[in-house]
Amino acid sequence: MSQPPHPAPLHQQLLANLKTVFTESAAPPSRPRFTGPITPDYTSNPVTIPPTFLTTAPPDARPPTASRINFAASPLPEYAGLYAVVLDHVLSPSECAALLALAEASVPTVDAEKGDKDDGGSGSGGKKTLLRNGPDDPWGPALVNVGGGREVLWDTYRNGDRIVWDHQEVVNRIWARCLSAAEEAASDDGDAMRERFDKIGAGEEEIVGNMWEDWAAGRWEFLRVNERMRFLRYGKGGFFKPHCDAPFADTRDPSRNIQTIFTIHLYLNDSKAEVEEAELVGGATTFFSRDRKRRIDVNPKAGRVLIFQHKGLLHSGDDVLRGTKYTMRTDIIYELKLPETTQEGVVG
């Protein structure tokens, strides 16, 4: 049986997503300001990871907790059946600070004379741009992906800084901490978390959307956590407008169906809403109703992890009113497995 066609290209999904955000908003923003699309250079410096980092509990570790967001009993009952869970104390404050320092160390220095570098004829414009604010600041502007490896600055939609660092071992350790935290939490939510993320039925439309009939008998199985970590820094006035996260499809092997389904969001510092002496005010991750009139806030807290499905959960990064917000975002990657009787030649 031939393989069903792929969904619309992800850049089309993103642009449709953004159109929905702005056309549904009661007060649309002013005309977006674009730079010309660029191909970012996310090359990283080699960084030595201490063998005990995230593998040994530090002195400031605290017992973890796990709590699934009960949308049915929340201000957003229309999201009943959708999945989001909050884990606290996955990392300690000292581990958050160490992770942030490692991320900053991963950013190459800027060669002021060379500037952009040739991309070796990749077909994406001939040049890759190293995103760094300056020689003393390893952070660069957080851009918006428009497909084809190209990104644009759109600071009326997303206003903050970013470091992109690819490191599979680090995300593996973070995920191991998440699973360990869920098990140690001694709650029904923690016990159910590993099972939830292990596999997803292709018929679970509230998680994965409508599938082609040929795929309905299959299931999405956990493959790995995305090695790409996106560290985010929002200063006073920083924000990320309401949106739904789009899946990333790994198309390097066309015989396999691999994509992200869940977002992992790790908060790296405290907000005043959680810790009285914290400097950060604002910056919550907010889940919204479609009319933006109802909401659930998840406030930043060092070591807190918020995991939620891409599909259907409209959310924003609220305005930072004071201080600086630091977070890291990555994803959980799945592979669609089909029974041998459904599609010949596909892993069963």
Image (cartoon, rainbow, N blue to C red):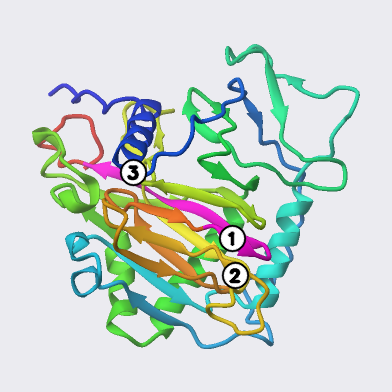
Task: Depth check: give the residue in front, 258 or 295.
Answer: 295
Q: Residue at x 40, y 85 (%)?
A: 185
- Residue 334 counted in the magenta span: yes
Secondary structure under the numbered disc 1 in the rendered image: strand
**Residue 102 appears left or right of 24:** right
* Quarter residue 235 falls in: bottom right
- Give the residue at mark 2: 281
Amino acid type for the residue under numbered disc 2: Val
Task: Report the magenta residues as a range.
Answer: 319-337
Label at residue 25: 3
**Residue 270 place in picture, x, y as percent:** 61, 74
In the picture shown, does residue 165 fall above or below 235?
above
- Give the residue at mark 1: 320
Between marks 1 and 3, how big is the CA–CA gap?
Answer: 20 Å
Disc 2 packing (10 Å; few <14; some 14–19; many ≥20): many
**Residue 50 place in picture, x, y as percent:** 74, 65
Between marks 3 and 2, how big is the CA–CA gap?
Answer: 25 Å
Q: Residue at x 36, y 69 (%)?
A: 85
Amino acid type for the residue under numbered disc 3: Ser
